[in-house]
Image (cartoon, grey):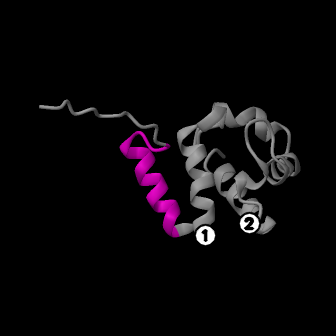
């Protein structure tokens, strides 16, 4: 009899709370933004988790213009527009506004 091997996989969504947030976002924002926001829900590659006031504080201190610029042009491990370069700037800025609203 052969052995069954189960491979672990890395998922952006690891908790029920993260799943709920992603599901809500799926109906509240354009489809392309769901993957971008999911990265922040899970804190992928050092991204500040959505709703984590302490993690967002230093970023908020730089001002909204800098947050928009980082989101549109990329910063560190985050690619421009979260890797979706065809996404309209207005949609990216709306995602930034939404995430900021969660920590104010």
Please tell me whether mark 2 sits on a helix, a strand or a loop: loop
User: Disc 1 marks which residue?
Assistant: 30
Q: Nearer the viewer, residue 26 or 104?
A: 26
Where 37 falls versus 85 (above or below)?
Answer: above
Where 38 falls versus 88 (above or below)?
Answer: above
Taking the magenta stretch, the answer to whether it contains residue 21 is: yes
Residue 39 quadrant: top right
Where is residue 93 drawn, in percent x and y?
76, 60
Magenta highlight: main SS: helix
User: Disc 2 marks which residue?
Assistant: 87
Left or right: 63, with 6 as reference point: right
Residue 35 quadrant: bottom right
Q: Residue furthest front?
A: 1
Q: Nearer the viewer, residue 99 or 1?
A: 1
Residue range of the region highlighted in magenta in the rendering = 12-27
Left or right: 34, with 91 as reference point: left
- Of labels 2 and 1, the one closer to you: 2
Residue at horizontal 57%, vertical 43%? 51
Please tell me whether mark 1 sits on a helix, a strand or a loop: loop
Where is residue 62 drawn, in percent x and y?
85, 39
Q: What is the distance, in whole Å, between disc 2 and disc 1 at their CAs?
A: 10 Å
Where is residue 68 drawn, in percent x and y?
82, 53
Taking the magenta stretch, the answer to whether it contains residue 24 is: yes
Disc 2 to disc 1: CB gap under 8 Å = yes
Left or right: 83, with 29 as reference point: right
Where 75 falls versus 92 (above or below)?
Answer: above
Where is residue 96 drawn, in percent x and y?
72, 54
Of the 4 image quadrants, the one containing the N terminus is: top left
Left or right: 7, with 12 as reference point: left
């Amino acid at each position: 009899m052969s052995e069954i091997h189960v491979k672990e996989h890395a998922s952006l969504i690891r908790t029920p709370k993260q799943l709920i947030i992603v599901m809500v976002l799926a109906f509240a924002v354009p489809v392309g933004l769901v993957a971008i926001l999911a990265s922040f829900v899970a804190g992928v590659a050092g991204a500040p988790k959505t709703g984590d006031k302490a993690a967002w504080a230093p970023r908020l201190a730089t001002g909204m213009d800098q947050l928009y610029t980082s989101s549109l042009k990329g910063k560190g491990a985050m690619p421009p527009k979260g890797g979706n370069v065809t996404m309209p700037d207005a949609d990216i800025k709306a995602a930034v506004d939404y995430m900021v609203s969660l920590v104010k």
